[in-house]
């Protein structure tokens, strides 16, 4: 069965001259071609190690005459590596190629066209064209399936030439081949061509799509993926077409290959946009859950892909995995990237019914070692409090326990989330402020510090020594980050509004305003300073009303992705885009974007939120973010939002008002809205969005500070920097 | 799709380098070495720089790496890497630096064969072995008819099995191994936070010709098809397994199993590959029989001592036994020494380098119970060390036991020559790093 080679010794750097001499010596007295084989192995090992072996080109190609398959393959490998750089010498091998193209052995024929098509220079492609045309009609399916991919290679070398040569039509014909492997490769090649910005458009009609489906049972697992993937190029005109197709592919969810499963899910999610039968949609959602969970028993890499996709899928189809929060609990020895991804899903699946369980897990994680994980766990406790009102008391208790540990990064994280909890449940938890104040010295990160300062300013009326605490914090005003300075400025003004009679407050606000307007370099800080100063000077009462005005309630609606954006992103299920939750055209140069296509069968809601495809230019401009206390500014928004009435603008919070301990939750319980949305994966048009459109926090990617900071994301290449430069 | 494929050793040296596309030069390997191999804190198996993405899988200190400039299908790329690793294991017996270097020419042949222009191609080991061998083949002597048979198989509907006439066994045998990994997370109070089983059925088929197999389990249909209002009766199927039926949450099959048949009547029918393969994987979460009970009592005594009382109880029949039981009990980082005592069987010692007490029990009979008590002494530390409080981990194996209760009902083999075949079934339940109880103090 398995036998060990002994070739490790060839991994030694050698000189071109030596190899040339050895090849020369091997031309005579080379029994069974052992010598040639040895030299070639040394050469291949050197290519592997990165040594340039191209000067040996004329010598190596001499070996092509050797009737040993192993030697032929090594020479071919050499040609694939260096052929492109030797356009003046490549003609030496063309006769050998042509001879092999007509070999009686199908494996040799396929090898020849496969190798030729890897050398995309005119001399070779010229010679390949005719042979490839024959190969596409070869009687052997192995040659045909190889030829199909060769067309894609030819097309990428010279699209117009491939089109002129009629190869695209030949490929299209291969989609109807009797052999499933050939069909699958033809589909793969056409998809590749169709994804090119300069490529011919590849669409499927119902008849062809059905023919492709028929090839699935006989296809290899990879072939199944290529075919399933191509179904997104078919646009159902009738609900029934989409429904029948989904029923046909749903069995593939039982396949052992995770890529088959995820691609099937992608196709199902896509087809569901065109379905009407509510029961069938529910059934499909139900069927998708278990295979997704099973993916969590695969290798960690596939688990990661699955988790990132699950996070997207459950936002669009919340019934999938609704009751499965437990399977996402972290195992102690999960790799960190899996733990972080699971945490996000746990939060999404948390409801009043399972909040206790989820909280117990989060508390457990908060005592682990990995910093990112612990912080995210602590933050999740806070987010859970905001999301599930019934769990808020327990969450607050958990956060207080964590603060008692005095572990600095835990305390800081807790302070940041507590600030949001105060806003979510006004008048309910302010009693814990003293506990927070005890840990003032532990805060050294700007965000945590700014959060604490916000709390001090906002509740200066109920914190007896707020003036002293703020005064202490102001000692280092000029050294602080802008985020903290802005927070201090606003807090000082709020303190003054509350306690305008107190000398200390007066003194403090004066000091801070002076610093902000005279000493600070940051224009935002200066402008805000001037604005406050002017307001206080003109009419302190009105200033008070503005600075302490009622803030819009905080909700968790905002961290659900926009429906239209989700629909679009889910067209990339299983791909890199689904890992980063970004449309590929936004981070990959020349990547093809996708959008749902309108048809009579497209459900009304999907149509209403449909985002047409925009060709984005890379690199995109980074949004300019001005950090400030409280929730950060909304970032560039994908969907238009109604203009905000000035009094409710995001910064209203900075500018104003009066804590009115409200009795009970706000009129429209955000939690209820959340639950409504939870069930609302139905495809009815949405109820007219009222309040939420006006709510500056809807569509706010980062209403909770930067908890998304540890989200996986592509590393951005410097703007204008040629990435080839970066990658050598 | 995949543009480049590499294998690196731990030092970041390239052992295999294959560029499928011209959008990269070989020097792209240097970027991976800098970003991943020499980076002590790699936090993702996928790294994207600009438009370039690197996917990597680690195996025995090797990195198997695929590079792309497209929005590649991430699941497919990883599955391809896994498959490549399996092929190497099958060809060379193992997958490590030595075996790759010793067989690099064959590896290059394989890499050229199983992927074309970045698109994974037929990668069924049985078929590959018919035309990519470690022995030299003289190209002229290979008869075209032989090759045609190979190509027919490599592109055919049963690409995983050689032509029937080429497979002959004197004795026709099939071995079925049901292997279950049981995961359990217990709270310090002994309650179950989570218990589930990842099972897989491994089959070794040494059967002549083209055998048609039918496989039966005592599973019960979990997903209620009736709820969807589709055609077909909703009941009837559900109680097929009888009284002792197990509930499987999900199952997934090898490429050879006809999924349409399974969908129609839950029958598992297939023509098996020759030799060893994974027939199916399944998952169960209900009625999990935990083979071992772990009852921990961990008490902090002041700040200088921690006492441990751990009791292990087997829950299965006295005829069976758990073997290779290893209990790992983490101790605080500032532990100086531990006194350990054992009641019953096994040996235990404190391993300072890992901060754990390791308790090994070679064999534990069904119905037996044993316990360990230990006292860890701590140094007083001035600074508070962050200690993650890892859970107590238990490792073990139990033969002829399934935690899910799954039983192989039958395996039928039909072949046109109508030979007699012998079937063997074995069951194994084991923990695999996921059988843990928290020692909350």
Image (spheres, coloured by chain):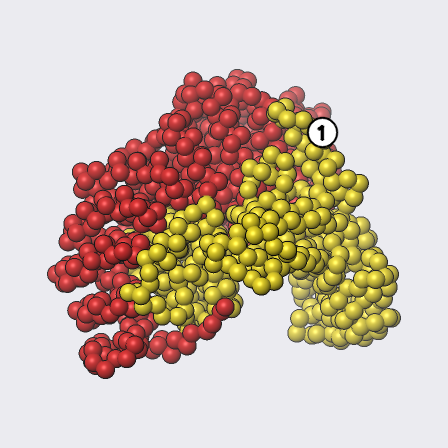
Chain colours: A red, B yellow
- Tell me: A86 left or right of B308: left
Residue drawn at the location 51% of the way across and 41% of the way down = A262
The front one of B129 and A58 is: B129
Residue drawn at the location 37% of the way across and 39% of the way down = A178
The residue lying furthest to the front in this view is B417
Q: Quadrant of residue A391?
A: top right
Q: Horizontal and vertical percent for residue A254?
A: 57, 42
A213 versus B402 height, above or below: above
The front one of A183 and A164 is: A183
Q: Horizontal and vertical percent for residue A274?
A: 48, 24
The front one of A608 and B1 is: B1
State the residue position of label 1.
B235
Residue drawn at the location 36% of the way across and 53% of the way down = B148
- Tell me: A317 left or right of A534: right
Residue A462 visible in the snapshot: no
Q: Horizontal and vertical percent for residue B1?
A: 37, 48
- Tell me: A561 left or right of A15: right
């Amino acid at each position: 069965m398995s036998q060990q080679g002994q070739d490790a010794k060839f991994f030694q750097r050698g000189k071109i001259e030596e190899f040339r001499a050895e090849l020369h010596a091997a031309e005579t007295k080379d029994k069974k071609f052992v010598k040639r084989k040895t030299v070639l192995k040394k050469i291949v090992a050197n290519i592997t190690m990165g040594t340039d072996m191209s000067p040996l080109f004329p010598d190596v190609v001499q070996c092509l005459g050797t009737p040993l398959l192993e030697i032929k393959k090594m020479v071919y490998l050499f040609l694939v590596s260096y052929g492109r750089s030797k356009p003046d010498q490549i003609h030496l091998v063309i006769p050998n190629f042509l001879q092999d193209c007509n070999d009686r052995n199908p494996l040799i024929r396929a090898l020849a066209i496969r190798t030729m098509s890897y050398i995309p220079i005119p001399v070779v492609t010229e010679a390949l064209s005719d042979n490839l045309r024959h190969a596409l009609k070869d009687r052997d399916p192995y040659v045909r399936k190889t030829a199909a991919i060769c067309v894609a290679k030819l097309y990428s070398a010279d699209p117009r030439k491939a089109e002129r040569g009629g190869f695209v039509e030949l490929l299209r014909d291969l989609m109807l081949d009797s052999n499933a492997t050939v069909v699958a490769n033809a589909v793969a090649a056409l998809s590749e061509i169709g994804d090119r910005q300069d490529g011919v458009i590849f669409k499927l009609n119902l008849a062809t799509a059905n023919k492709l489906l028929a090839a699935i049972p006989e296809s290899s697992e990879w072939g199944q993926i290529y075919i399933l993937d191509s179904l997104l190029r078919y646009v159902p005109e009738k609900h029934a077409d989409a429904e029948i197709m989904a029923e046909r592919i749903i069995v593939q969810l039982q396949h052992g290959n995770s890529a088959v499963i995820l691609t099937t899910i992608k196709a199902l999610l896509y087809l569901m946009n065109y379905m009407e039968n509510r029961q069938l949609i529910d059934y499909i959602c139900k069927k998708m859950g278990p295979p997704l969970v099973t993916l969590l028993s695969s290798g960690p890499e596939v688990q990661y892909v699955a988790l990132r996709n699950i996070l997207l899928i459950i936002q669009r189809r919340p019934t999938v995995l609704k009751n499965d929060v437990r399977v996402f609990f972290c195992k102690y020895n999960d790799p960190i990237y899996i733990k972080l991804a699971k945490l996000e899903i746990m939060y999404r699946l948390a409801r009043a019914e399972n909040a206790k369980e989820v909280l117990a897990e989060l508390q457990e994680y908060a005592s682990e070692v990995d910093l990112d994980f612990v912080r995210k766990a602590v933050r999740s406790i806070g987010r859970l409090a905001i999301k599930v009102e019934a769990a808020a008391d327990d969450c607050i208790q958990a956060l207080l326990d964590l603060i008692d540990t005095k572990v600095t990064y835990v305390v800081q994280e807790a302070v940041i989330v507590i600030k949001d909890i105060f806003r979510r449940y006004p008048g309910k938890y302010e009693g814990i402020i003293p506990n927070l104040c005890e840990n003032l010295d532990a805060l050294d990160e700007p965000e945590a510090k700014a959060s604490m300062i916000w709390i001090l300013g906002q509740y200066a009326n109920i914190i007896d020594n707020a003036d002293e605490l703020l005064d202490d914090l102001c000692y280092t005003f000029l050294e602080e980050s802008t985020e903290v300075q802005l927070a201090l400025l606003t807090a000082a003004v709020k303190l003054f509004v509350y306690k305008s009679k107190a000398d200390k407050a007066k003194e403090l606000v004066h000091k801070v305003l002076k610093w902000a307007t005279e000493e600070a370099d940051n224009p935002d800080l200066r402008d805000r300073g001037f604005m406050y100063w002017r307001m206080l000077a003109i009419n302190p009462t009105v200033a008070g009303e503005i600075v302490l005005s009622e803030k819009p309630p905080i909700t968790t609606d905002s961290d659900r992705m926009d429906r239209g954006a989700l629909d679009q992103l889910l067209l990339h299920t299983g791909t890199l885009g689904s890992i980063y939750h970004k449309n590929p055209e936004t981070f990959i140069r020349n990547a093809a974007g996708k959008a749902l296509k309108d048809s009579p069968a497209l459900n009304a809601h999907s149509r209403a939120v449909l985002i047409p495809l925009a060709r984005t230019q890379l690199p995109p401009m980074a949004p300019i973010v001005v950090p400030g206390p409280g929730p950060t500014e909304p970032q560039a928004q994908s969907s238009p939002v109604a203009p905000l009435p000035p009094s409710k603008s995001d910064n209203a919070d900075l500018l104003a008002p009066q804590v009115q301990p409200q009795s009970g939750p706000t009129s429209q319980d955000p939690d209820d809205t959340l639950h409504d949305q939870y069930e609302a994966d139905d495809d009815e048009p949405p109820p007219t969005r009222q309040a939420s459109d006006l709510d500056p926090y809807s569509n706010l990617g980062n209403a909770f500070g930067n908890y998304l900071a540890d989200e996986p994301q592509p590393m951005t290449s410097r703007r204008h920097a040629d990435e080839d430069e970066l990658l050598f | 799709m995949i543009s480049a494929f590499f294998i690196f050793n731990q030092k970041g040296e390239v052992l295999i380098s294959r560029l499928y596309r011209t959008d990269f030069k070989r020097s792209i390997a240097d970027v991976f070495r800098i970003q991943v191999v020499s980076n002590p804190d790699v936090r993702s198996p996928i790294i994207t720089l600009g438009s370039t993405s690197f996917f990597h899988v680690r195996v025995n200190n090797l990195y198997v790496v695929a590079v792309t400039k497209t929005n590649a299908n991430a699941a497919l790329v990883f599955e391809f890497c896994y498959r490549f690793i399996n092929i190497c294991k099958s060809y060379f017996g193992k997958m490590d630096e030595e075996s790759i270097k010793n067989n690099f020419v064959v590896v290059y042949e394989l890499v050229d064969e199983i992927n074309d222009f970045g698109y994974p191609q037929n990668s069924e080991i049985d078929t590959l072995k018919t035309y990519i061998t470690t022995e030299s083949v003289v190209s002229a002597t290979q008869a075209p008819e032989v090759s045609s048979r190979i190509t027919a198989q490599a592109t055919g509907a049963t690409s995983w099995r050689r032509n029937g006439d080429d497979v002959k066994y004197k004795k026709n045998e099939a071995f079925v191994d049901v292997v279950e990994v049981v995961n359990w997370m217990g709270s310090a109070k002994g309650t179950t936070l989570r218990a589930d089983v990842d099972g897989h059925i491994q089959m070794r088929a040494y059967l002549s010709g083209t055998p048609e197999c039918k496989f039966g389990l005592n599973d019960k249909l979990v997903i209620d098809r009736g709820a969807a209002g589709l055609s077909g009766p909703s009941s009837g199927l559900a109680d097929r397994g009888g009284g002792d039926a197990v509930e499987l949450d999900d199952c997934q099959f090898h490429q050879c199993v006809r999924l349409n048949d399974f969908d129609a009547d839950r029958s598992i029918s297939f023509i098996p590959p020759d030799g060893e393969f994974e027939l199916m994987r399944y998952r169960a979460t209900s009625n999990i029989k935990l083979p071992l009970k772990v009852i921990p009592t961990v008490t902090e005594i002041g700040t200088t001592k921690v006492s441990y009382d751990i009791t292990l109880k087997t829950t299965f029949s006295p005829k069976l036994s758990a073997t290779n039981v290893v209990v790992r009990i983490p101790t605080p980082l500032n532990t100086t020494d531990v006194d350990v005592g054992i009641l019953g069987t096994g040996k235990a010692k404190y391993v300072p380098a890992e901060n754990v007490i390791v308790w090994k029990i070679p064999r534990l009979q069904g119905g037996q119970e044993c316990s360990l008590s230990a006292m860890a002494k701590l140094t007083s530390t001035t600074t508070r060390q962050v200690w993650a409080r890892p859970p107590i981990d238990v490792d073990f194996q139990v033969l002829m036991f399934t935690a899910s209760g799954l039983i192989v009902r039958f395996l039928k083999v039909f072949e046109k020559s109508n030979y007699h075949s012998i079937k063997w079934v074995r069951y194994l339940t084991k923990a695999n790093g996921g059988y843990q109880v928290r020692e909350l103090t």
